[in-house]
Amino acid sequence: MAYESFRDFLTLLEQEGELIRYSDPIATELEITELADREMKKPNGGKALLIEKPTVHGKISSFPLAINTLGSFKRMALSFGAKSVDEVADAMGDLMQAKPPTNMKQAIGLLKSAMDLRHVRPKKVTSAPCQDVVHLAKNSKTSIQDLERKDATLLDLPILKCWPMDGGRYVTLPCVVTKDPDTGERNVGMYRVQVYDPWTTGMHWQLQKVAARHGKRYFETGEKMPVAIFLGGDPVYPFSATAPLPDGVDELLLAGYLRKSSVPLVKCKTVDLEVPANSDFVIEGYIDPKEELQMEGPFGDHTGYYSLADLYPVFHVTAVTHRRDAVYPATIVGIPPMEDFYIGAASVRLFLPIFKMNFPEIVDIALPAEGVFHNLVFVSIKKTYPMQAYKIMHGLWGMGQMMFTKYIVVVDENVDVHNTSEVLFHWFANTDPQRDSILTRGPSDVLDHATSEFAVGSKMGIDATKKLPGEGFPREWPPLIQMDEGIKCRIDEYLSRNPH
């Protein structure tokens, strides 16, 4: 299902009982964070919140603010236009496993998949709601007919100061567009943006990110790097921006597949980049590689701790454009569970078929909320030979952002990896610490404050599977305590006749 505006999605959430409106003024300085954090900590992620009158330095903003819009599995499914995340994941799995048809039923199924892919590629348009209102920076050389030239200002937007020790206000749900200067390939990533003043921000792209690689090439050539940030529009946009796609794969292709409609792209007013035409806000500008880096941070991060101030590129704003009826989208991160847990869990579910293509023995993968994405991964496998768990550990550490994972725990196929208590039981019951663990080193998340070196750290793998003789286990492995199925059925029948 394609949403033509962020408001369309919010309207559906309200119809589904998934949105709470607040009509009183609430401050963007810390108050919205506290309100949203309490909601996110509720069972199943609470509700989405629409703050109709967010205040900036005590003044009511012209734009309402929505937060926690993707903070539950139900809302994630609604963002895909589906009944459940599993429904989308199953369709994606069928696409990955498509084979030449051998009968009419298979042929019809393959044709349906092909029809779905018609909408993957973005389409170009010449006019766009996201450019209903155009504000140009004072130093912009662009001349736009029939539009009033105004100063671009970020200070009118209801941008949050999330936590007490934050270095300032942060755009927390930005889709950042950059282009490879050599190949022209587009990348859409999500990197926090600290507002320094009305016309400049920090750009926190970490050294392992694609945009950082693009930036390095501009640094080598000395040319100014065009950058565009878009917010709002179809809710699949921020999801796609955070998806673990390979370098060089356009995130807007994924967005087109998920929304079953081509993403309409319009050219920016002041930079040579394109953004979704149905976005709510677009912030255009550039990064000058000849300019000195500037301190960015601290920031209350998804790790549950503040990431400390460090040097990052400065983003210069040349234009701010927006819908006339724009709604500002925001999120917060911090001690889990938060909204980002549900986004990350949906991402793992959708991309599980790709993991299985590389490792057919994988049954399921889970990233517990307490692991804040990269710290802890549970994997269940169909184990058929000795040391297979270690093969999986090393394989996952070599796949994209899984390289940041500090702990991987591998369990047998009968263990529900989404039940942390069940995983812990098998972990502690099935392991000898010295025999069943491995330590190695590799890249780490730059936000990981526990590593002794920046972006470099150690990793631990735990083999919590049933041990085989070939793994140096000469003893007999005991059976797990389980009740006879016939007895369970008899008691089920008894309790249905005698409810208490």
Image (cartoon, helix red, strand yellow):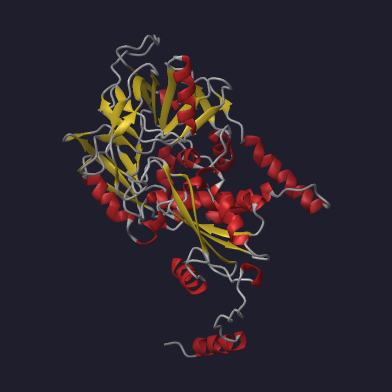
Q: Quadrant of residue 392?
A: bottom right
Residue at 56% x, 33% y is 250
Asked whether the viewer can see residue 253, the reply is yes
| Apparent side of residue 285 relative to residue 393 in the rendered image (left or right) | left
Q: Quadrant of the N terminus?
A: top right
Task: Work out whether residue 88 can be spotted.
Answer: no
Q: From the viewer's perspective, is residue 460 above or below residue 400?
A: below
| Front-lying residue, 15 or 390 | 390
185 horizontally vs 33: left or right: right
Residue 101 image offset from top left, x and y in percent:
80, 49
**Callout count:** 0
Q: Is residue 125 above or below residue 77?
A: above
Find residue 338 and report its horizontal and vertical position in percent: 36, 52
At 53% from the left edge and 27% from the top edge, which residue is drawn? 186
Q: Give the quarter of the image for residue 122.
A: top right
Q: In the displayed orientation, state which residue is furthest to the left.
A: 58
Residue sticking out furthest to the right: 102
Q: x, y percentage for residue 133? A: 36, 22
Q: Residue at x 58, y 86 (%)?
A: 489
Task: From the top left corner, tell me how far across and down residue 261 is, in percent.
Answer: 58, 37
Figure quadrant of the C terminus: bottom left
Is 101 displayed left or right of 335 in the figure? right
Q: Is residue 57 above or below residue 22?
A: above
Residue 123 lies in what quarter of the image? top right
